[in-house]
Image: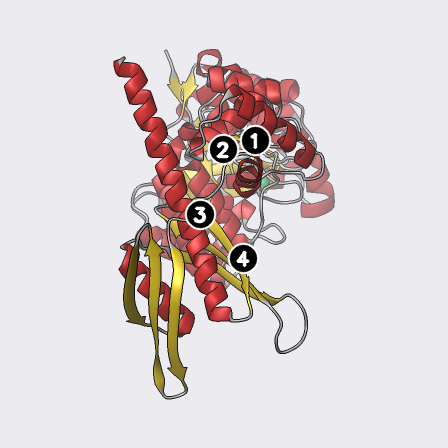
Amino acid sequence: MEERVFVFDTTLRDGEQSPGCSMNVQEKLRLARQLESLQVDVIEAGFPISSEGDFEAVQEIAKTIRGCTIAALARAVKGDIERAWQALQYAARPRIHTFIATSDLHLKYKLKKSREQVLEDAVAAVRLAKSYCDEVEFSCEDASRSDIDFMCKVIEATIDAGATIINLPDTVGYAVPDEYGAMFRTVRERVPNIGKIILSAHCHNDLGLAVANSLAALKNGARQVECTVNGIGERAGNAALEEIVMGLKTRREYYGLYTNVKTEEIMKTSKLLSSLTGMMVQRNKAIVGANAFAHEAGIHQDGILKSPITYEIMTPQSVGIKESTLVLGKHSGRHALKQRYAELGYQLTEEELERAYKMFCAIADKKKEIYDDDLEAIVEAGFTSTEEIYTLENLQITSGTSLRPTATVELRHGNEVLVDSATGDGPVDAAYKAIERITGIIGELKEYSIKAVHSGHDALGEVFVRIDFDGSLYNGRAASTDIITGSVNAYLEALNRALTRKRRQQNSHRRTVKEETV
Ligand code: KIV
Ligand code: ZN
C-alpha cells in the first residue's frame, strides 16, 4: 500500500534566513499564497522571537492562509514558545516547532549544558508548546552527529510530553544516505512509543546530498520531509522541494510513496521566489533550471522529436513548463532545424533544408545560440524573399509644439493606392496608426531604435523595429535621411514579413489538404 509523505516547506524560515534571500512581510505573504496553491502540507512561516519582521510575517500568514498548517520556530525556551504562539494563534491549523541540539558537540561548545539539562529543557518546551496547541514538532538539532542512545531517550521523553512530529535534522549536511537512512531505522526500532508520531527528515546540502539523504530517510520510515523551494537555505542550502517531490513522483513504484503537491505549480513557485529574492537558479538545476527541459545535441533532439520519453523522464507540463525546448546550436541536427522552420512557417524541400543546414552550421560555429531571426535571414538570403505587399507611396506629417501630430499615409497594395490619416502621441505613432487603419492589421511595437549611420546633419537614420503581429515577432529595418519615412518603411518591412509568412503557411496548408484529398 502506498503511503503519503507530508511536505513541510521551510522556504520562509530556513530558506529566508540565508544570505541574499530575505523578504519583507508582503513578499512572504505572496510566497505563502503560492505555497498554498502548490498544496504543501505545512508552511514554516518564520522564527517569531528572532525579529519583529518575522513575528509580523508569521502572524499575517497565520491569519491569511487557511489551506495549510502554519508552523513557527522556537528554541526550547519559554519566551520563544510564548512568542511563537502569539504569532500563530489565528492560524486554522497552528504548529509550534521547538528544538534543541542533542549532539555532544553542540552541548559542549554551544549550549554548555549536560545531557540531563538538555533532556529536561526538551520535555519542558514540548509540554509548554502542547499547552497552546495540539500539533507540536520537536527537532533534535544536529541529530546526525548525536549519540543515538541519548537521542532515542530524548525522542521517547518528548513523545510522552506531547510531541506529534519528531524531526531529525542533518543540520550541517554531514550525513550520507545509507547512514542517515539507518538512523531513522534505528530510531523506529528502539523508541517504544515511536508509532504515536510522524518522523521527519530535514537535510542541508553541504556535501550536495540533501535530497539523496531526505529520500533515504523516507525509504526508512520518515513520513514528513522538510525542504525549500529551489533548495535555498543556510550555507549550501536545504533539500530542494521540487527535487524531492518529483523524485517521489517519477520513481513512485520504487518508493511506494506520494505527496499531495500540485506539481504543475512548481515552476511558477520557483520563478516567484527568484523574482522576490533576486536569487536565480543555475541553468542546469534539476527540475527548475532553464536547461532542465532543453535539448541541444542532435541525437537527443532527433530522439525527442520521435518520442519525448527517449530523453525525458518526466514531462515539462508536469512541473508547469509549457513544452521542452530544442535549442538550436552547433550540436543540433537537420531534424530539429526542419521542425523549427516548419514552426516558423517555412516548409523546406530536402534540397532547401540541406542548403539551410550548411549555412546554419557556419553561423553556429560562430554563435552560441541561433535565434529565429537568424533562421529567417538564412532562408530569406538563400532562397525565399519577403513580398512587398504594402509599399509607401506618400507620407505627409504635420507636427509642432502646439499641433497635434497627424499623419496622412498613402500605401500601394497591388494595383490600389490606399490613403488614411490618424493622430498620435508623436509623428511616428500617428503614421503607424494610419497604417493600421489602412491595413486593418494591428501590430504591437515591442522595440524601436534609431541610430545615425554617419555623423552630420544630413546623416542617414537607420530605424529598427520589432513588432508583434498575432503573437509572433517580426523585425523591420530601413534607412532614410528622414526618420519618419525610415520608421514607416521599417514598419512596412515587418508587416510584409508577417503577411508573407501567413501566405506561405496558407499555401502549405492548401498543399497538404490537396495531397490528403488526392
Ligand atoms: O537545520 C536544523 O537543524 C534546523 C532546525 C532548527 C530544525 O533548521
Ligand atoms: Zn535547517
Q: Amino acid at mark 3?
A: Leu
What secondary structure is found at the residue carrying circle 1?
Answer: loop
Residue corresponding to mark 1: 286
The quadrant of the rendering that contains the N terminus is top left
What secondary structure is found at the residue carrying circle 3?
Answer: strand
* First in residue order: circle 4 vs circle 3: 4
Left or right: where 162 falls relative to 417: right
**Residue 151 occupies quadrant:** top right
Ligand 2 under 8 Å from disc 1 Cβ: no
* First in residue order: circle 4 vs circle 1: 4
Looking at this view, is 192 or 188 the one in front?
Answer: 188
Q: Amino acid at mark 1?
A: Ala
* First in residue order: circle 2 vs circle 4: 4
Please say which color scheme the image uses: secondary structure
* First in residue order: circle 1 vs circle 2: 2
Q: CA distance from mark 3 to mark 1?
A: 31 Å
